[in-house]
Image: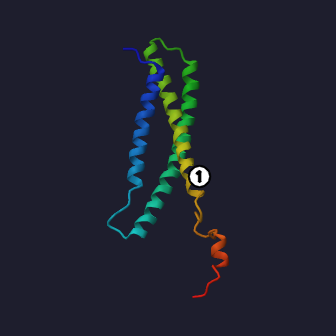
Amino acid sequence: MVLSPMTVTILIMSVLGAGWLAVRERVARLDLQQVYHVASYEQDQRKARFYFRTVWAGLFAGAVSVVALNLFASLPFHPSQTHNVLIGASYGLGLWGLLVIGLVWTQVGKRVSQPNSDGRSPLRQSEEKKQGDGRSR
């Protein structure tokens, strides 16, 4: 059976992506043994560390992929099966790195776009609340 580089690329991306999603689900889980606000704070801390490390892992994977592809392009391979697997694995690793960086930045952008995301910014109030309704109680 001859494996094409695209098949190996999809296989590598699927395995790495499933692993990343499994770890992310574990990190994003609330600890039900604690009070909600403490568990939520610790969950946010774990997610922040995980996303930070994931971005660096994605950048490292992309860099390793580029170096490997450059190396494999200059080496002659006699068995084409080995060449296909190495090229496909390199592409898969690099594409996984880019995909993970995109996923993390999507999560960061979603979080930052929420009102009062830093905990210090004032929330925008509607005109009704600013002026009051004119009735005294």
| Image location (x, y in percent) of residue 85 | 45, 22
The type of residue carrying mark 1 is: Gly
Residue at position x 37%, y 70% from top? 35
For residue 48, above or below residue 130: above
Q: Which residue is mark 1?
A: 109
Residue at position x 49%, y 33% from top? 93
Q: How is the image coloured?
A: rainbow
| Image location (x, y in percent) of residue 104 | 53, 47
| Image location (x, y in percent) of residue 128 | 64, 73
Q: Is residue 135 left or right of residue 77?
A: right
List the single residue furthest toward the bottom: 137
List the single residue furthest toward the left: 33
For residue 39, above or below residue 68: below
Residue at position x 43%, y 64% from top? 40
Q: Secondary structure at mark 1?
A: helix
Q: Which of 48 and 113 lies nearest the eye of the viewer?
A: 113
Q: Quadrant of the C terminus?
A: bottom right
Q: Which of 64 and 113 lies nearest the eye of the viewer?
A: 113
Q: Which of 107 and 15 lies nearest the eye of the viewer?
A: 107
User: How many numbered discs, if any?
Assistant: 1
Query: In which image quadrant can residue 22 be found?
Result: top left
Residue at position x 54%, y 18% from top? 75
List the single residue furthest toward the top: 78
Q: Residues within 10 Å of mark 1 (few under 14, many from 20)?
A: few
Q: Is residue 131 left or right of residue 37?
A: right
For residue 64, above or below residue 69: below
Q: Quadrant of the N terminus?
A: top left
| Image location (x, y in percent) of residue 117 | 58, 63
For residue 48, above or below residue 55: below
